[in-house]
Image: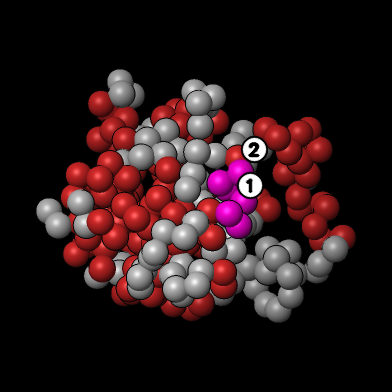
Amino acid sequence: MDYFSMLMEDVRMREGLKACMNCGVCTAICPAAEFYDYDPRQIAETVQSRDNDRIEALLKSETIWYCGQCMSCRPRCPRGNTPGYIIQSLRYLSQKLGFFTNSEKGRQQLALKRTIGENIMRAGYCLVPREIDPDLHPEQGTVWRWIYDNDRDIYPLFTSSYRKVGAGALRKLDDQTLEEIHRIFELSGGKELFDLIEEHSDHKAREMGYDGATREYMMDTFTKNSSEQ
């Protein structure tokens, strides 16, 4: 496989990598570089090298999942590169090829697909109060558990449209709008990507001794870590 050519099929890659001279300005400004073993300059250099082995190692690594997509790198590059776009392209290819399952942080893509991704498909929103499972967010504490359990009493105090079709905050989208969202995902390849994430995750889960990509596997990959990342 020619990974560089595959990456260049992504318009974000063509926009993000023009002519990196490895000055390091992106790394100097990057918030993630302060906390992780993460260097946007090195990522751009690796991709620009067109070295298949190095790019494959990057696709399978923890590194591409450290970026917070703040895009601080975009306005500061003297050559007009955007390392954040390069990361987006690398992540997309990693998901398509199943390489994301090789890294601890990459395996969390399953949880993101089943939460944010499926929230969009079910309700049309990235975040839906009723879908923010306290089991997946213990950092929210006992207050969130109480709000979650009593949402039908609490949210109507702030908006009369809660979980109802019509205008207003936290409204329920009508069937026609949801159908349009589903169609967008089908035509854009989003639905196919979701299926690939499930397929690759199921294969990896069985390899790790789980009975497929079960909720147990998803919860373990999302809530547990080796403390090395």
Amino acid marked by disc 1: Ile
Q: Which residue is mark 1?
A: 132
The residue depicted at 54 percent of the width and 64 percent of the height is 73
Q: Position of residue 3 (x, y in %)?
A: 20, 56
Q: Is residue 63 above or below residue 46?
A: above
Task: Answer left or right for 64 relative to 55.
Answer: right
Count neighbours of disc 2 (C-alpha within 10 A) and say few if under 14, some if 14 to 19, many if 20 or more.
few
Q: Position of residue 44 (x, y in %)?
A: 38, 57
Q: Position of residue 212 (x, y in %)?
A: 31, 31
Taking depth in this image into account, of 168 and 160 the one nearest to the observer is 168
Taking depth in this image into account, of 77 and 12 the one nearest to the observer is 77
Task: Answer left or right for 42 relative to 3.
Answer: right
Magenta-tinted stretch: 28-34
The residue depicted at 68 percent of the width and 77 percent of the height is 166
Please tell me whether mark 2 or mark 1 is closer to you in this view.
Answer: 2
Q: Which secondary structure class fits the magenta region best?
A: helix
Badges 2 and 1: C-beta atoms under 8 Å apart?
yes
Query: Which quadrant of the view contains residue 41?
Result: bottom left
Residue farthest to the top? 209
- In the rendered structure, find residue 137 and report the number of the disc placed on it: 2
The residue depicted at 35 percent of the width and 70 percent of the height is 19
Query: Which quadrant of the view contains residue 13?
Result: bottom left
Q: Position of residue 116 (x, y in %)?
A: 52, 54
Q: First in sequence: mark 2 or mark 1?
A: 1
Task: Answer left or right for 160 relative to 110.
Answer: right
